[in-house]
Each structure stands twice: as structure tokens, then as C-alpha cells.
């Protein structure tokens, strides 16, 4: 489970001056903690940071918990010196929660308090915005990147933003821990797909695993009749298999799918980009022309596969998959100026979650621009 950090900021001088203020602010922070926890993340709450010493302690604690992102709740006015040490040490994205307790102050009740001390305490309970410019100023001067969520505790629009940040933290962690396989080579001459693998690793943290076709062939040769039959049955469940599909092609794709599963398992892959040609009639061509069905099954299991060795696309598909949105390798096909639409598609694996209805398994007499023939998938998005 993704870990997200949370800490509130305040000023310890206030606590003895305004009775009940600290308790109220802690209650609001607890509400924030509980709401964020509902988004499927583990909230690491460092409590209230109200002086520079507590800032160091909170920074050490959050650092030890290896949080992916930290939410900084501005509970009242606080010195920027209680914020900077935490952000400097963690070096993770900082989201400043500028959340008031309510959408508007009950002005009539406030004005009827009749005690300027009590009125100041209530004002401090609602002055979250007071510290925001100071914090932004210090972060800007310190080169620390940050974002704001502004609203109030029952503001659903604000909570939608906060939830999006937790989802982004999950995806960032997944990408950093992902192992991307590269099988074969780039489509020759398609210069835009050529990727800087070191750049991919340095930006996302993704491990790149270079794969050999001979390893995939080994697993395919070792596939048993029982495994192949089980895979054919899986095809029947996952796909709307066209009656046009020849039995020999279904068996060929199923055997390759068994091998792909084994390759993914042995190499602990979370995604893959692939392409291969070779000489006409060789064993590797037999494999690469029968991968689409198996790669589509893997893509639907959160192991996205992109053809033409499009590494960037495989990375994008992995991001979309971790968001729960699916994704597909595709390209522009046709412009319809009458209906004002652009059609996209491709003869390769795709994620079933984006399909309208069942995914069809269909025969292709030729893979355009590529060698051989075999099965492909067809869906309406």
C-alpha cells in the first residue's frame, strides 16, 4: 500500500493563550487523516508541528516511513521555519492543504462572542490562508516544488484534488518499482519510437530488462498440451472468438501465450515492449506473429504490452493501467470531416477495460507492414 505523509502546522505560543484551539485543530487534522485513508493509501501522520524542534522530529519520522508524497495541513498561522526542514529532508512532492473548517464563518455568532480574546482564538481557528504566502515565498526561494489544494473540510472539489494526488503517488511508486521488458528490437526506420532507455530509468525509476527471443522460444517449446488447452479455454472466456479463426492459429497463439506468461513470471515483468522480424519462415517469426492474443491477456492483467518496441507507449500504458483506466497502443487512422472525428486503431494488444462490449479475437491474413499472418483483436472503444 502506498504511504502518504501528513503533518499539521501551528504555533506553540498560541496553545496556552487560547483554550481549546489546539484540540480543535487536531480534530480537523484527524478528519483529514481519516478521509485520505479512504483512498486506499496508508497515512503516516506526524501530528502537529508547532516549533522547529518538532519539525526536525517530524521530518525524521516521515523520512523513516519512506512516504511517496506529503500533505502539509495549514491548521492556523505557523512560522515557515516549522515547514522548511520537513520539505528539505523528505524531497518528495509537497501538497499544501489550505483547508478551512467551514465554507464561511458564522459572523453573527462570532460578533456576539463579546470577548476579544475568544474572538482571536476563533479567528486563528479559521485563518488557514494566513501562512500560505509565507510558505510559498520560502519554498520558492529554496527551490522546493509544491502545489496547493484550497477549500474547506466538506469541499468535495478539494477532496477530488486530494484523491487525485494520492492516485498520482501510487502510480509514481508503481512506475519506480516496475520492470519493463524489451523483447526484440525497434521497428526499423520508425525514428520517433527510438527511446533513451537511461532517460526512462532516470525519470521514472523503471528497471529495463533486455530480453532474448531464444528464451521465449525455450518456454514455448516446453509448453505442455494441458497448458495449451487451458489457455485456449481462457481465450474463450476473455474473447469473443470469431468462427473464422482456424484451430491451428488458435493453438499457435495459445502456445505462445503460455510462453509469454512464463517469460513474464521468470523475469518478474510489469510491462513490455516488443517487435521482431527475422528471416521469413524462421521459428522466431512463428512466435512473433502469434503474440497478440497472449499480450492482450497480459495487458488486461495490468502487465501492458506495446508493439513496435514502443517503449514510451509501454510506459504510458503502464501509467494508465495503474490509474485503472487501461490503454492501448494506437495511431491515427482516418479523419472524418463530416462527423468531425479522428479514428484511431492498431493491430496489436490492448486493454479490455477500454472496450465497449467483449473483445473479439479475429484472423488477419496479413499484418500490415510486418511479416506473416495470425490472430489479432478487435474492439469498439
Image: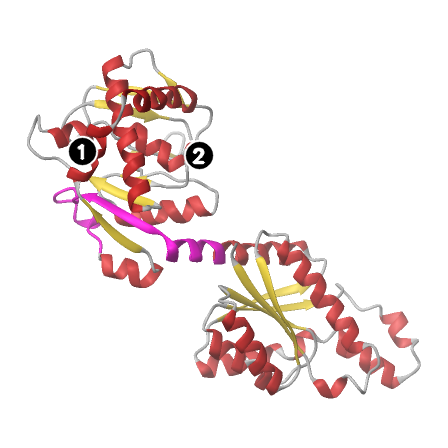
In the image, residue 175 lies in the stretch drawn in magenta: yes
Q: How many angstroms separate mark 1 from mark 2 (CA)?
A: 31 Å
Vertical relation: 57 (above or below) 333: below
Q: Residues within 10 Å of mark 1 (few under 14, many from 20)?
A: some
Vertical relation: 316 (above or below) 137: above
In the image, residue 165 lies in the stretch drawn in magenta: no
Which is closer to the viewer, label 1 or label 2? 1
Q: Nearer the viewer, residue 88 or 118?
A: 88
Q: Which mark is residue 354?
A: 2
Residue 246 at least partly seen: no
Residue plotted at (26% across, 61% down): 199
Residue plotted at (37% across, 41% down): 303
Q: Nearer the viewer, residue 102 or 326?
A: 326
Residue plotted at (51% across, 65% down): 69
Q: Which residues are magenta?
A: 169-195
Q: Position of residue 126 (x, y in %)?
A: 75, 73
Q: Position of residue 354 (x, y in %)?
A: 44, 34
Q: Position of residue 299 (x, y in %)?
A: 37, 37
Mark found first going from the N terminus, 1 or 2: 1
Instruction: Give the labeled residue for mark 1.
Output: 217
Vertical relation: 280 (above or below) 327: above
Q: Residue furthest left?
A: 279
Q: Label 2: state its secondary structure.
A: helix
Residue 20 relative to residue 61: left or right: right
Amino acid at each position: 500500500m502506498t504511504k502518504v505523509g501528513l503533518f499539521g502546522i501551528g504555533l506553540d505560543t498560541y496553545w496556552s493563550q487560547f483554550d481549546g484551539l489546539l484540540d480543535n485543530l487536531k480534530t480537523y487534522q484527524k478528519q483529514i487523516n481519516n478521509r485520505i485513508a479512504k483512498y486506499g493509501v496508508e497515512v503516516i501522520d506526524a501530528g502537529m508541528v508547532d516549533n522547529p524542534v518538532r519539525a526536525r522530529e517530524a521530518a525524521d519520522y516521515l523520512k523513516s516511513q519512506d512516504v511517496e508524497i506529503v500533505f502539509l495541513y495549514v491548521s492556523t498561522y505557523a512560522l515557515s521555519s516549522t515547514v522548511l526542514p520537513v520539505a528539505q529532508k523528505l524531497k518528495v512532492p509537497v501538497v499544501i492543504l489550505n483547508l478551512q473548517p467551514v465554507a464561511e464563518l458564522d459572523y453573527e455568532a462570532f460578533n456576539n462572542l463579546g470577548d476579544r480574546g475568544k474572538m482571536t482564538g476563533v479567528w486563528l481557528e479559521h485563518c488557514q490562508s494566513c501562512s500560505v504566502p509565507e510558505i510559498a515565498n520560502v519554498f520558492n526561494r529554496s527551490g522546493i516544488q509544491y502545489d496547493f489544494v484550497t477549500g474547506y473540510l466538506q469541499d468535495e472539489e478539494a477532496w477530488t484534488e486530494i484523491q487525485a494526488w494520492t492516485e498520482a503517488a501510487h502510480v509514481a511508486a508503481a512506475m519506480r518499482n516496475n520492470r519493463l521488458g524489451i523483447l526484440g528490437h525497434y521497428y526499423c526506420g520508425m525514428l520517433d519510437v527510438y527511446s533513451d532507455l537511461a532517460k526512462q530509468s532516470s525519470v521514472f525509476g523503471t528497471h529495463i530488462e533486455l530480453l532474448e527471443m531464444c528464451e521465449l522460444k525455450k518456454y514455448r517449446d516446453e509448453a505442455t498440451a494441458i497448458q495449451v488447452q487451458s489457455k485456449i479455454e481462457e481465450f474463450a472466456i476473455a474473447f469473443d472468438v470469431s468462427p473464422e479463426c482456424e484451430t491451428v492459429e488458435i493453438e499457435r497463439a495459445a502456445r505462445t501465450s503460455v510462453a509469454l506468461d512464463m517469460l513474464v513470471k521468470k523475469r518478474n515483468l510489469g510491462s513490455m515492449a516488443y517487435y521482431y522480424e527475422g528471416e521469413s519462415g524462421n521459428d522466431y517469426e512463428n512466435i512473433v506473429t502469434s503474440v497478440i492474443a497472449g499480450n492482450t491477456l497480459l495487458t488486461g492483467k495490468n502487465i501492458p504490452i506495446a508493439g513496435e518496441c514502443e517503449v514510451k507507449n509501454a510506459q504510458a500504458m503502464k501509467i494508465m493501467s495503474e490509474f485503472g483506466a487501461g490503454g492501448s497502443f494506437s495511431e491515427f487512422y482516418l479523419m472524418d470531416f463530416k462527423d468531425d472525428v479522428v479514428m484511431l486503431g492498431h493491430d496489436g494488444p490492448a486493454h479490455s477495460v477500454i472496450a465497449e462490449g467483449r473483445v473479439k479475437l479475429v484472423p488477419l491474413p496479413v499484418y500490415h507492414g510486418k511479416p506473416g499472418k495470425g490472430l489479432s483483436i478487435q474492439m469498439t472503444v
